[in-house]
Image (cartoon, rainbow, N blue to C red):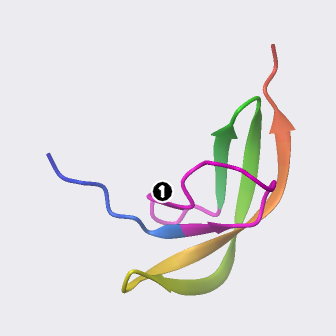
């Protein structure tokens, strides 16, 4: 089994959010939605990159959240 390769870094969002900030998404994605408790945190591609553990990652910045419908 191949281990996923991280290709993005998430910045911003609610204080204390415990979701992974470094993750893998489909190449070319411009928006990422992450489940965090009872809401989804939304992130948009910034066009910037950052180096994490020697690997360049595309930076996505927090753009808002929506709550999960019951």
Is residue 20 on the magenta stretch?
Answer: yes
- In the picture, which quadrant includes the N terminus? top left
The number of callouts visible is 1
Residue 67 relative to residue 4: left or right:
right
Within 10 Å of disc 1 (Cα), the crowding (few <14, some 14-19, many 20+) is some
Q: Position of residue 62 (x, y in %)?
A: 77, 62
In the image: residue 32, left or right of residue 51: right
The stretch of residues the image draws in magenta is 9-30
Q: Which residue is at 81% across, 13% downward?
A: 70
In the displayed structure, 57 sits above or below 2; it is below
The residue under label 1 is: 25
Q: Looking at the image, is 41 positioned above or below residue 8?
A: above
The quadrant holding residue 10 is bottom right
Residue 53 is covered by the magenta coloring = no
Q: Residue furthest front?
A: 16
Q: Main secondary structure of the magenta part?
A: loop
């Amino acid at each position: 089994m191949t281990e996923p390769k991280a290709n993005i870094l998430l910045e911003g969002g609610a204080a204390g959010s415990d979701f992974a900030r470094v993750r893998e998404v489909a190449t070319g994605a411009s928006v990422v939605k992450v489940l965090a408790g009872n809401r989804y945190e939304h992130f948009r591609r910034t066009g910037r990159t950052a180096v994490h553990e020697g690997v360049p990652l595309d930076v996505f910045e927090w753009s808002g959240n929506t709550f999960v419908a019951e």
